[in-house]
Amino acid sequence: MNRVPETELVLIPGGTLLTDTPEEGRILAITMARHMIHNIQPDLDVLKAGRPNYAANPDSLIAASQVVAIEFQTIAAANNYWRK
Amino acid sequence: MNRVPETELVLIPGGTLLTDTPEEGRILAITMARHMIHNIQPDLDVLKAGRPNYAANPDSLIAASQVVAIEFQTIAAANNYWRK
Amino acid sequence: MNRVPETELVLIPGGTLLTDTPEEGRILAITMARHMIHNIQPDLDVLKAGRPNYAANPDSLIAASQVVAIEFQTIAAANNYWRK
Amino acid sequence: MNRVPETELVLIPGGTLLTDTPEEGRILAITMARHMIHNIQPDLDVLKAGRPNYAANPDSLIAASQVVAIEFQTIAAANNYWRK
Amino acid sequence: MNRVPETELVLIPGGTLLTDTPEEGRILAITMARHMIHNIQPDLDVLKAGRPNYAANPDSLIAASQVVAIEFQTIAAANNYWRK
Amino acid sequence: MNRVPETELVLIPGGTLLTDTPEEGRILAITMARHMIHNIQPDLDVLKAGRPNYAANPDSLIAASQVVAIEFQTIAAANNYWRK
């Protein structure tokens, strides 16, 4: 098996939900969502094989962006929405 | 690859979740959802190829509007629902 | 293109999430969900063409009502659940 | 058209999210979800025609129960979870 | 019709969202989700007929576990997350 | 039936939603989601039979990661987002 590198399996990169800016919070949401996928399916070849269909399918893109939106809800709340 | 312009890839346009009005908050939700899609699939030709099927399919439209509804929950909370 | 009228494209009709009653809040949730669809697909003919299949399909009806339920969560929180 | 009776179209029956008990709150969630469907599709014959497939399909039952779960989140929060 | 027993139709078994432990809260979430299904489809034979396909289908299992996750959000909040 | 071991059926392993770090909270979210699946379908052979299709299907992976995201929302709130 062509395994995803260990750094791609860390569930919460940086070990905290707190970020300096909303943009960084959004990047964390994306990373958390992607690393979650890697933990369920750590075989890079299988992931790459699914990529073409997935990334060209609007419904799959919408579903993926929904997961990021949910992760971002958590991160935004953690950061008190970066108010002030 | 016909890449989406850089401005379309900014995750949180304006760098804040705070807006003056609910209408602007809703626009931000839409933009965040759209830019998220662009980050997953930055090839404009692929995006355009999927558009006709997606935009004429009620189930896809419902799914897309659900993502915006979730993003808007976060933005509305950030703005204390624009009370007062 | 037979474009949806401008009034059907306003994202937050009335410009506020605050309503006098839960019933009005629910109507706002429905309107926000419907206008969101219109913003993604503003061609009235395409929308009408999809309507017969969508509105007779239980799974599509359930999906649409879920979007309204999510929008309503936001509106209900904004109104402190119309307590008292 | 064999139209759903008017009482089945009221969005928030009773006009409030507040209930005396969790059981009544759950009933309200179910009613709100069902009346929402009726508002999107008020033709009773169409609704009845879809019922056999829908109610025998586990995935549809799961989807419908998810909508109720989301409505119930709102109602439970409105009632401060009926604590004490 | 081979009707689900009355005890399986109670929407909130025990009549409260409050539980002593997270484990009991999770059990309540599962029961609420299952009883919801029973209320929509109270025919035991229909439920049993759908079971083999549903319980062997990973996507259906994921969908069902999502409903429990949503019910559990409500119950956990009601119990202040069993802190202390 | 080749039954999932009892330890894999505990709904909230450790009996608490509180964890020391976000990483541990995320692990708990994954475990809760997986054990939920085991409770619905405790036959290990059926679970293993579904695994190849599921784990190679991007849409299934996205759906599974969404359930974890929802469980994590609850756990993160329980831990006050591990602030400070």
Image (spheres, coloured by chain):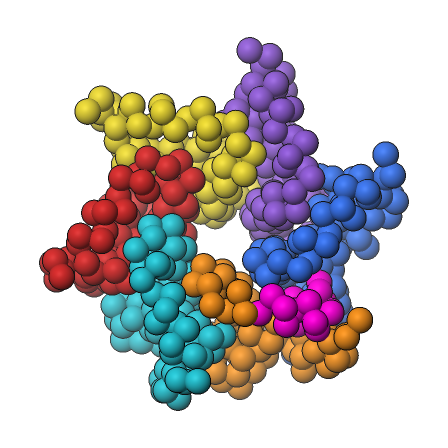
Chain colours: A yellow, B purple, C blue, D orange, E cyan, F red
Q: Residue at x 26, y 25 (%)?
A: A4
Image quadrant in which you'd find residue E55: bottom left
Dividing the picture into quarters, in which one does residue F17 lie? bottom left
Image position, residue C69 (x, y; %): 60, 61
Asked whether A8 or B55 is in front, the reply is B55
Name the residue furthest top: B1
Q: In the rendered picture of this protein, how many numbered marks are placed on residues? A: 0
The vertical placement of E13 against E27, above or below, is below
Give the residue drawn at x 30%, y 55%.
E56
> For residue B5, what is the image quadrant?
top right
Residue C77 visible in the current orientation: no
Residue D48 on the magenta span: yes
Image position, residue A19 (x, y; %) = 43, 34
Q: Which residues are magenta?
A: D35-51
Q: Position of residue C16 (x, y in %)?
A: 75, 55
Residue C63 location (% of width, % of height): 58, 56
- For residue C81: magenta? no
* Viewport quadrant of the C terminus of chain D: bottom left
User: Split into 4 quadrants, where in the image is the N terminus of chain D?
Assistant: bottom right
From the viewer's side, name the closer residue of E23 and F53.
Answer: F53
Residue at the (38%, 55%) spot, across then down: E60
Residue B47 shows in this picture: yes
Question: Magenta region, mostly helix, strand or loop?
Answer: helix
Of residues D14 and A83, the one drawn nearer to the viewer in this rendering: D14
Residue B4 in the image: above or below residue E8 = above
Whether B76 is drawn above or below A59: the answer is below
